Amino acid sequence: MSANYWIKLYHEILRDPKMGRLPDRAWRRTIEIFLLAGETGQDGRLPDTPDIAWQLRVDEDELLEDMRLLAEQGILTQTDDGWLVTHFEDRQRARTSTERSRRHREQQRRDEYWCNDSLQERNDDATNRPTESDTDKESDTDSEPEAEPDAALSSFVGESFRSFENTVGMVASQHQAEEIAEFLAELHERGHPEWWQMALDVSCDNNARKWSYMRAVLRNWLDVGSPNISGNRARASPQEDEYDETAALQKAKRYGLE
């Protein structure tokens, strides 16, 4: 009997059509046979059919029916010496150092992909940051004067997205993220980054915590050239009548706009 207490079971089984289309009983039988092959420790060769039937506590004829079905799918192979699991030896052997290195690199790439799919990454993408080729071109020239504004904008965008998600909720889509980023870029360019927090506050005051409301507020302010909080009744909001004029004026004073 083998000294191994486990076998390798590959994730690809979940996406393998020949496995996925097996009846439930045959699927279970497959895993049982894999385990028996590993326990036997003879490179995939299985015990005699009567012995397998006894270990699995199943009828021998039923077992043979299942094994023939698995043979049709290429999972098992019947030879003159008996049954064996197809390619079992190749799949269970220890990986070489080269294979281990390759697997490690693949895992690192997967980890980097999922770790980098964060809110900050989405924000950076939405602000139309320079492409990799543009960055390479800029590295050959004196790009230091542009570095500080870009860093300030990136920081402003990141903080603004966080405040939005803490106050309004998660960004609903990539399109919404891009639209928000466009407004943030315009606010930063025109020197009014504080309007973002003001718009969040107005949304809260009107009990309208949603992007469509904030978008109408910011668009109005940008078109008019000033927040004009007392006159901005957020036309996009169905709760327009609940606007608190006194609270808005107090907020305007707090921001030094009166």
Image (cartoon, grey):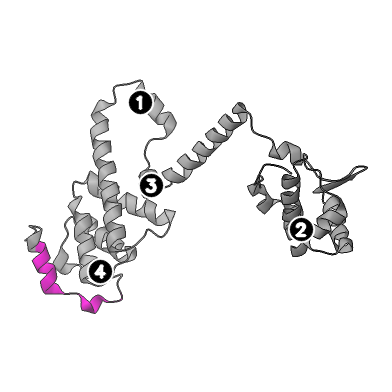
Q: Quadrant of the N terminus?
A: top right
List the single residue furthest toward the top. Answer: 140
- Which segment did they paint magenta? 238-252
Tag in front: 4 or 3: 3
* Pair 4/2: label in front: 2
Residue shown at the point (36%, 43%) measured from the top left:
124
Task: Say whether disc 3 or disc 2 marks the residue closer to the N-terminus.
Answer: 2
Q: Amino acid at mark 2?
A: Arg
Per the model, the C-alpha gap separating discs 3 and 2 is 50 Å
Provide the major secondary structure of the magenta segment: helix
According to the picture, the residue beneath numbered tag 1 turns out to be 138
What's the mark number on residue 126? 3
Residue highlighted by disc 4: 234
The mark lying in front, picked from 3 and 2, is 2
Mark 1 or mark 2: name the one nearer the start of the chain: 2
Q: Is tag 3's residue or tag 1's residue first in the polypeptide sequence?
A: 3
Q: Is residue 131 above or below residue 78?
A: above
